[in-house]
Amino acid sequence: MAGGMELGTVSRGFRSMFFMLTPNESSFQKVEAVPQYVEQATPFFIGLMVLELLVGVLKTGGSVVTISDGLTSISAGMVSRLPMLLMRGCELSAYMYVWDHYHLVELPWDSAWTWWLTFLGVDFCYYWVHRFAHEVAVLWAAHQVHHSSEYYNLTTALRQSLTQQFTSWIFYMPLALALPPSIFAVHIQLNLLYQFWIHTELIRDLGPLELIFNTPKHHRVHHGRNLYCIDKNYGGILIIWDRIFGTFASETDKVIYGLVFPIRRFEILHVQFHYYLYLWKKSKIYKTIIHKLATFFNGPSWKPGKSRLGDHDDNPKVTGKEVPHDPSWSMPLQVYVVIHFLLVLGTYHELIENKMMLSQLTVLGMTCYILLTLTSLGFIIDQRPRAASLEMLRCVIMVTMHRYSYIKPFLPLLAVPTEAFVSLSLLYWALQSCSQLLSIKRKAA
Ligand SMILES: [Zn+2]
Ligand SMILES: [Zn+2]
């Protein structure tokens, strides 16, 4: 019986990745009863990423993902979910508040009509969340994270913004006047999950489905920095919104992925925050308050004298021969980074699983530790001069936390990783001492 139950859960989990759940099995009366579809999807994320890697090797003879880029993307996915350890998602919290105080009608939670209407409403609002995220520079500062990879594979889907959630909720509020929070809580998750599988180059064309649905083909265009790709194909599950509002483009020339000005960095906090700093510096160039404000609220390409969205012709031209940035780093360092990344992934997983049993202080401490680890690994990938000292500091913190049982629930589980940390850190330190031999130098920016 337990086996049967488990099979049902697995099947539902798998289908939730492709918007293949029925209203019947995904309607709930109370928000508390709504499954954590996104958190439960981790095994499917990993399974599909491994599948893509294998199929990619068979099909192209090479790897569709690199260690530096793939780990940076998965790290961004982890970082973006960290605020949810301390509070319910912003979107859902705000939604429940508006519903409790201002809802005009109460559509029945157990009707398929309500379910389908919520699906359409969430997907429509997502289109506008996404379009504003591209057309308003300060919102783009958050969303550019998702576009910062020069590769396009399933790991790119996980490269999510930490700060976007703090503004995107506003766009969903009109729905809270009529549609129950419990159904919204389902669709806000299914909409996000659907967008995972479309981040692949291995699926070329899906025939008639391309007319209605957002597909790998359409979303590749969205990630392109070719002139014909800029500000196109914002849809979440449906592509019809782009066709209606005139932002649709179909895939023609070879798509070159990433930002118009590629960041060529893998350090996680830089990926998340560099554009805010850029905007601040850009605004300081202008003398008038109007121009300063326009820097933040017009499009990212805007300049004085241009229209709201600026002129994309001014941006660097794509030749089609661009090669994605992949740092050259030694094999021992790659092995070291991958092992430590897997260890911190384990810590992250434990934290998510046990968050209800831990004090806020412990959750905060672990969160800081995860951020520090991901930053330090990014320093190593970017081969920054301070990488070795930051990494040593991190290992000391790790051992101290272990020694003082700060992270008690994980103690047995962390005994082996801690051993590994210490021995590998010593190995790393030895390797760093021979850095001339390994010719680790930070390339001049
Ligand atoms: Zn986008
Ligand atoms: Zn995307």
Image (cartoon, rainbow, N blue to C red):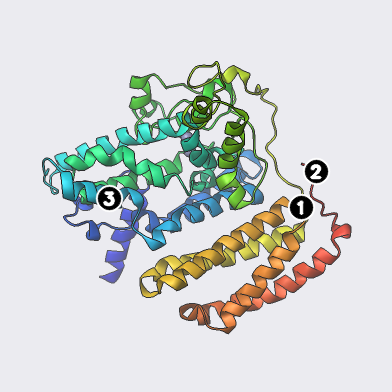
Query: Residue 444 — which label?
Result: 2
Residue at x 49%, y 48% (from the top left corner): 158
Specify the amino acid type for callout 1: Trp
In front: label 2 or label 1: 2
Residue sticking out furthest to the right: 437
Query: Looking at the image, do the residues carrying marks 2 and 3 touch, with CB atoms under 8 Å apart?
Result: no
Specify the amino acid type for callout 3: Ala
Residue 359, compared with residue 324, is above or below; it is below
Question: Could you tell which of marks 1 and 3 lies nearer the N-terminus?
Answer: 3
Q: Which of these two is toward me, 147 or 102?
A: 102
x%, y% of residue 375? 62, 57
Instruction: Please say whether residue 264 is visible from this viewpoint.
Output: yes
How far is mark 1 from mark 3, CA to CA? 43 Å
Few, some or many residues within 10 Å of mark 2 (<14, 14–19, 20+): few
Few, some or many residues within 10 Å of mark 3 (<14, 14–19, 20+): many
How far is mark 2 from mark 3, CA to CA? 47 Å
The residue singled out by tag 3 in the image is 185
Query: Residue 329 — which label?
Result: 1
Question: Could you tell which of marks 2 and 1 lies nearer the N-terminus?
Answer: 1
Residue sticking out furthest to the front: 288
Query: Looking at the image, do the residues carrying marks 1 and 3 touch, with CB atoms under 8 Å apart?
Result: no
x%, y% of residue 322? 69, 30
